[in-house]
Amino acid sequence: MQKLLHCLHPLAGALAILCILSFMTASVISELYGSAPAIAATKHMILWGLLVLIPCLAFTGLSGYRAVGRSPRGQALVKLKRMRIIGINGICVLVPCAFFLAVRAAELRLDRLFYGVQIMELLAGSLNLALLILNFRDGLRLVRFRQI
């Protein structure tokens, strides 16, 4: 079971990174080049994408916690602290923003408030993306270090 967790953990983390990157890319492209209905469709699809992203993040966090045990140290502790920030940012900022933007876009109300929240979502998403990439990098370093 532990070996399976070690295999699935980086895959779930990589999928989470790809989800966030695709959400952000789709948002920016639809905002720059799409019509209002295209923006609404993008926001709607991002909501559906949360059904993939949230379980990936939850599994990544839980499997990482399980792998290091009750008293993580060193780089594992740093990764755990980052995951806490990622989780809080996702629950408190990104998920509410995604729902707000999807509802607002469906109503075709693309006003200053919509774009203000969109900017906040892109900034918070960028933070989560950066932290996930750092965790992925550090995870690879931890695995490499254990094999030496």
Image: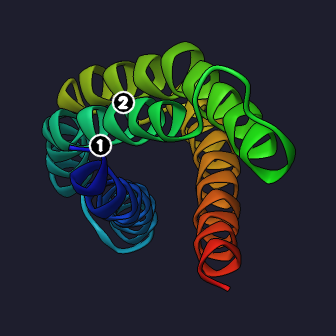
Say left or right for 111 vs 102.
right
In which quadrant is the N terminus drawn? Answer: top left
Residue found at x 58% / y 28%: 69
Residue found at x 56% / y 25%: 87
**Identity of the amino acid at label 2?**
Ala
Residue 115 rendering spot, x and y as whole percentages: 56, 39
In this orientation, which residue lies closer to the viewer: 70 or 104? 70
Residue found at x 41% / y 23%: 95
Say left or right for 132 vs 134.
left
Residue 61 rendering spot, x and y as whole percentages: 47, 34
Say left or right for 77 vs 126.
right
- Residue 56: mark: 1
**Identity of the amino acid at label 1?**
Cys
| Residue found at the very far front of the displayed protein | 148
Q: Compared to 96, does 29 lie above or below?
A: below
Question: Which image quadrant for residue 143?
Answer: bottom right
Residue found at x 32% / y 21%: 99
Task: Say whether marks 1 and 2 touch (CB < 8 Å).
Answer: yes
Q: Residues within 10 Å of mark 2 (few under 14, many from 20)?
A: some
Residue 90 rendering spot, x and y as whole percentages: 52, 27
**Element at badge 2?**
helix
- Residue 58: mark: 2
**What is the C-alpha distance between the residues marked 1 and 2?**
5 Å
**Element at badge 1?**
helix
In which quadrant is the C terminus drawn? Answer: bottom right
In this orientation, which residue lies closer to the viewer: 63 or 55? 63
| Residue found at the very far right of the displayed protein | 74
